[in-house]
Each structure stands twice: as C-alpha cells, then as structure tokens.
Amino acid sequence: MILLKDILFGVSIISISGNTSSTIKEIRFDSRRISTGDLFIAIKGVKIDGHKFINQAIANGANTIIHENEIYSKENGVNYVHVENSKKALAIIASNFYNQPSKNLKLIGVTGTNGKTTVATLLFSLFKSAGYKVGLISTVKIIVHDNIYNTNHTTPDPITINYYLDEMNRIGVEFCFMEVSSHGIDQLRTEALLFKGGIFTNLSHDHLDYHNSFKDYRDVKKSFFDNLPKTAFALFNSDDKNGHLMVQNTKAKVYSYALKSNADYKVKVIENQFTGLLLKINNCEIWVKLVGVFNAYNVAAIFACADILNLEYEELLRLISDLDSVTGRFDFYVSNSNISIIVDYAHTPDALKNVLQTINNIRSGNESIITVFGCGGERDKGKRPKMGEVASILSTTVILTNDNPRSENPDAIISEIQNGVDPKYFNKIILINDRKEAIRTAGKLAKEGDIILIAGKGHEDYQEICGKKEYFSDIEVVKQYLIEL
C-alpha cells in the first residue's frame, strides 16, 4: 500500500488540499489511462497542457491531482497538491513510488549527439558477457537482463524509467546503461535519478527545432554533468571542442578519452577496414569488429567506462574484441556481385560526414559511392541543407528520398536538402520519393566493387507518412533486393 504522503518526499510543494494518507494505486500523466484510486499529474507539454484534462482525470477516478497552475474550483473527496514544477514533481514522485530504484544499482548515463546508442548498447553487451546482470534503456529498446521491451523515446518518461529500474532491482541487476537525450534532460525526465557515471560522446548540429540555439542545446547537455554527484564519474571526449566545457562545473570525478589530444584513455587507429579496426589502447593492440574512426571513439568510451567500473584489464580487452556492431549502425553486407552495402542510422550532418569519410578512407579509390538518404519531417530543418552538402561532396551519386516525412510535404523536405548542394554537384543528385524504389535504384546503378550507403533510419522498422506509421525496414529491403545482385 502506497500513501500519498510517502511519494511526496522531496517535492517542492506550494500547498496541499485533502488527505495525504490517501492510498495511491498508480501515477499517471495521461488522463485517458486513469482509473479509480490513481494520481494524475498535470504536465505542461510542448503542445498540450495537462491542466486542461484535470476534470477528465477526476471523472475517470483520480483521487489526487498534482498541478502547477492555480486551481480555484475543487472537487470534494479529491486531493490537490499545488507544486512549483509539475515535470520535476513527476520525476520525484515516480522515483518515490518505485522506492527510488536508481539507488540500488550503478546507473550510467550516456549523452551527446552521436554514439549514444552504440556506447550504451555495447556497454550492456560487454558487462553481460562479463557475467553481470545488466539493464539497458536506449533508443532501440529497453532490456532487463534477458527481457526485451520496445520503446518510443531515447529517454522515456520518468514513470517508465523508474518502472523498469524497479524491475531491474527485482532481479538483482547491478549495472544499467542509459541513453540520456537533450529532450530528456530539458524535460526533467532524469530528475531524481542517482547516476553512478556520465559519458559525453560529442556535440554537433541536431534538435535545433526544439532548442532555441546550439548554445541552448549544448548547455542542456552540460546540465547533466553539472548535476552529477561527487560519488559519480564524468567521462568525456577531449577531442570534442565542447568536451572540457561539459565537465567544467561537475562535482563528479573527471576522466577523459581521445584519439588526438592528451587524455586518460588514449586510442590510436592502426588499421581501418570494412571488417573492423586494429586499435592501440593505452599501449595494448586490439582488433574490434566495429568500423570507422567514429567507432574508435566509441570503443575508447566503452573501454574507459569499463575500466573505471573495475572490469579486469585483460578480460576487458578480450570481451571488447568479441563485441558485434549494434543493429543499424554501420551494418555491412556484400552482394553476390561484390557490391558493398552499408545501412547506418546517421541522421545528422556530422554523423553522415563520419560514415562517408570512413567509406572514403577505406575504399581503394576507384569505386563509386552511392548514398541514399532523406530527412525526417517536423524535425530540425536547419540540418537538411547541411546533410545535402555533405552527401554531395563525399558521394559519387546521391539519391534523395523519404525518411519519416510525418505530416510535412516530402517534396518540400527533399527540396530543402537540395538547397545545400553546390550547383557543380547537381549532376550527382537523383530524386526518388519512394524509399524502397530509391534503394532498388541504387542497386541497379551499382557495379562490382561499388559501395551503397543507406542512411538515416538504421534499426527503425517503420516509416511515418501523413501521421501514420507503416512497416518499413532498410535492412529487409537490402536483404530482399540487393544481396542477390
């Protein structure tokens, strides 16, 4: 039995009306999911204000309302808790409701523009291979050791996070690796979580549809490290120009990793092939199955984090060499006619540039690079021309197509991508709205030895068009139409 007064601990409260000894069945911020005995938290969202649905929540059986706005007309028998910030209250209440589960395991947050999924997922795989019970909260999925659950957000809402952390507590999970997005930080979804460590990968242009400027985007990321406790560690990429800034005010113990600059964990690329990387990490050579310099950074972050968490050194090197790449992150295929095909989630200018530079660095020089990509609708429009510019410079042929146009006009999105293409590269550009047909066309254009890059969606198994999600997988299309070429 959970009492209201028990889950309000730590919440900044302005006033309370009602009985704090009331029993709370569930906590909800969606009035449609309310049933008798539930607590409803009215959240001010980007598009919808939950305060408009308080009456609906009460009609559905809510016995307690957490609200940020003043309420002048109150229902008898309903508890009202007026708080300073509903989002922050939600995070604290969710943690209290599940008995503060983050305190009972080692929670590591991974943030940055690119590499979050790869670093978090590979750390999960690494520690599981080392024999630990582990958890993962990522863009792709939530995993409680052996149990896999789907997720819709890089950083879920606080109720979802704490629910799964509680599940991890139940089975004795020791380590949990979690992607921490700028949206999640800004919307206080990670508030009230106790992190054992934080990892900063890099920072580049992304999510400027949500954040007012790059500075705001950067400062939100920085706030995650500002709020780490002194019992935690902060691990950052010192080659990134924003790396030192991220940990400038942190109370956590600071460590660095790098390929170019001085760092606590230094990595050097000795060989870079489509089959993997030969790396030198702190004077030890290691072969990994991951490809590209950007993955050398990811390996450096993984190695450093695992070493900080006291994984045995030689065992760590062995386990890293056994790691497979993450689905949709530089997935590599070879067709029957020796055409190389790469599927990658790259959906920012920097990520696309990293993948294309990797391909150009590995190829012998005579092969054509055919790049297929688009940009998502209702998202950061500023990156569209930048991605067009990058692709046109670093590719032989570029096929512009749909990604997830959502409710935007697909032709308008493609036109905005084209705006970044220098006129001297116009002859490289082909427009094909239908993504499956675009991928098939890349196969028809490719000759033996050529390389096809299909970017933007990676692991995703849907396209969102006109507000509807339809099943679609780049990987399945590749296997169905390109492998037999």
Image (cartoon, helix red, strand yellow):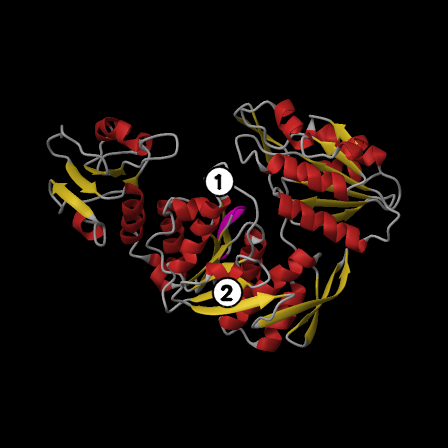
Q: Which of these two is toward me, 7 or 387?
A: 387
Image point (51%, 58%), residue name: 200
> Which of the marked residues, 2 or 1, is nearer the chain's N terminus?
1
Q: In this rendering, would 75 be left or right of 99?
A: left
Q: Are marks 2 and 1 in contact (CB under 8 Å)?
A: no
* Residue 124 visible to the viewer: yes
Q: Is residue 101 above or below residue 367?
A: below
* Residue 330 visible to the viewer: no
Location of residue 224 in the rendering, given as x and y in whole percent from the top left corner: 41, 55
Image point (86%, 50%), residue name: 365
Q: Is residue 267 above or below residue 330?
A: below
Q: Which residue is mark 1?
A: 152
Q: Amino acid at mark 1?
A: Asn
Calculate the distance from the C-alpha at mark 2 to the C-alpha at mark 1: 27 Å
- Few, some or many C-alpha atoms within 10 Å of disc 1 (few <14, some 14-19, many ≥20)? few
45 in magenta: no
Please report the bounds of the magenta region as a residue range: 139-145
Q: Amino acid at mark 2?
A: Leu
Tag 1's secondary structure?
loop
Location of residue 203 in the rendering, given as x and y in whole percent from the top left corner: 55, 52
Location of residue 96 in the rendering, given as x and y in whole percent from the top left corner: 27, 53
Q: Is residue 310 above or below residue 328?
A: below
Front label number (2 vs 1): 2
Residue 137: which disc?
none
- Identify the image quadrant of the C terminus: top right
Residue 235: which disc?
2
Tag 2's secondary structure?
strand
Q: Which of these two is toward me, 440 or 411?
A: 411
Q: In this rendering, would 450 be left or right of 17?
A: right
Location of residue 428 in the rendering, given as x and y in whole percent from the top left corner: 80, 34
